[in-house]
Image: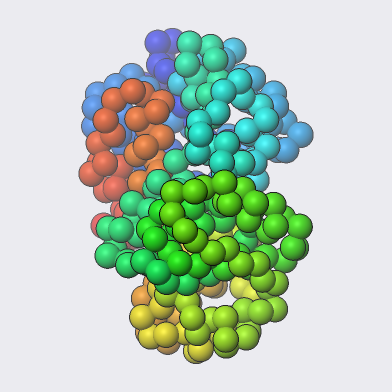
């Protein structure tokens, strides 16, 4: 039961009705016996500033920020982690004694999930579709895993170029970042080189179609990964599944980044097994 002493955390997004973050975080609170709760709020772009300010006014622990607010959120907080600054996006806003701190757990969450699946990207080519906050996190995760080349494919070149310039600041290892347009996804020469293709756009979440892509030109072990998660295979994953290519959706990334966010909000270790059980049950995978 919620009471006057209950501490709140939440997710802000638009849309947000599909989010399973409340199930995960509330399962974690129940497992630990904490008088805390996690809610989901549909927040429009126009209302984002007021919603962020309400975090301190309501003495909330913090919030996750999802589509389409991650990039704007970095301009609405007092402090940023180095990773949020590099990516130009924040998926967590933490209330630290009245000071709002922005962080980004997406890249760390995706990297943890890809490594758990045994994916080896060392020296290989990865295609990332999109150039927003999710794409930035996906590209950084792949670079950390040693990818030799990240090919960013986006509708507009301006946004992709901005992302490339951001990633160029990451100097931990030699890497190559190339830019491409969406029509190039039907060119076998690009697709045939990929060890993994990652969809970092909302396509599939806001529509039932994905852009044309020559799935049959990929190597048989090319991994297709969709940051979108649903009970059924997404429009991006379904053709790959039919060809027998390895596929994964964003459920594992959601779990891993959610556990990291839980620790930021609550300053205690996350009960990952309880969070996973709640998430996978909701997706029909338990």
Does residue 80 appear in this view? Answer: yes
Task: Decide if residue 139 is on the left or right side of residue 27.
Answer: right
Task: Decide if residue 271 is on the left or right side of residue 35.
Answer: left
Colouring used for the render: rainbow
Image coordinates of residue 253 in percent, x first then y, are 40, 52
The residue located at (66%, 27%) in the rendering is 76
Image coordinates of residue 50 in percent, x first then y, are 69, 23
Quadrant where the image shows the N terminus: top left
Q: In which quarter of the image is residue 89?
A: top right
The residue located at (70%, 72%) in the rendering is 181
Picture layout, residue 100 above or below residue 155: above
The residue located at (61%, 73%) in the rendering is 210
Depth check: give the residue in front, 274 or 243.
243
Image coordinates of residue 172 in percent, x first then y, are 44, 49
Quadrant where the image shows the C terminus: bottom left
Picture layout, residue 50 above or below residue 174: above
Picture layout, residue 201 above or below residue 220: above
Depth check: give the residue in front, 230 or 267.
267
Depth check: give the residue in front, 167 or 157.
167
Image coordinates of residue 45 in percent, x first then y, are 72, 38
The residue located at (26%, 30%) in the rendering is 269
Depth check: give the residue in front, 203 or 200.
200
How many labels, in total?
A: 0
Picture layout, residue 178 above or below residue 241: above
Does residue 202 appear in this view? Answer: no
């Amino acid at each position: 039961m919620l009471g006057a002493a209950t501490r709140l955390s939440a997710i802000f997004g638009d849309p947000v009705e599909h989010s399973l973050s409340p199930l995960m975080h509330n399962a974690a609170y129940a497992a630990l016996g904490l008088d805390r709760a996690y809610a989901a709020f549909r927040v429009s772009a126009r209302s984002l500033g007021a919603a962020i300010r309400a975090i301190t006014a309501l003495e909330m622990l913090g919030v996750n920020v999802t589509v389409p607010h991650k990039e704007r959120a970095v301009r609405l907080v007092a402090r940023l982690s180095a990773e949020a600054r590099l990516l130009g996006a924040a998926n967590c806003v933490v209330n630290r004694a009245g000071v709002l701190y922005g962080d980004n757990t997406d890249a760390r969450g995706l990297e943890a999930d890809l490594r758990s699946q045994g994916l080896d990207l060392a020296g290989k080519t990865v295609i990332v579709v999109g150039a927003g906050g999710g794409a930035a996190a996906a590209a950084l995760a792949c670079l950390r895993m040693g990818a030799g080349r990240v090919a960013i494919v986006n509708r507009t070149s301006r946004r992709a170029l901005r992302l490339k310039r951001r990633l160029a600041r990451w100097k931990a290892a030699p890497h190559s970042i190339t830019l491409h347009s969406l029509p190039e996804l039907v060119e076998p020469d690009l697709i045939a080189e990929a060890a993994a293709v990652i969809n970092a756009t909302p396509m599939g979440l806001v529509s039932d179609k994905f852009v044309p892509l020559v799935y049959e030109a990929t190597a048989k072990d090319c991994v297709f990964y969709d940051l979108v998660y649903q009970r059924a295979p997404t429009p991006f994953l379904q053709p790959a599944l039919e060809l027998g290519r390895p596929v994964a959706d964003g459920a594992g990334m959601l779990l891993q980044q959610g556990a990291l966010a839980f620790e930021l909000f609550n300053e205690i270790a996350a009960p990952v097994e309880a969070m996973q059980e709640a998430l996978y049950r909701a997706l029909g995978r338990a």
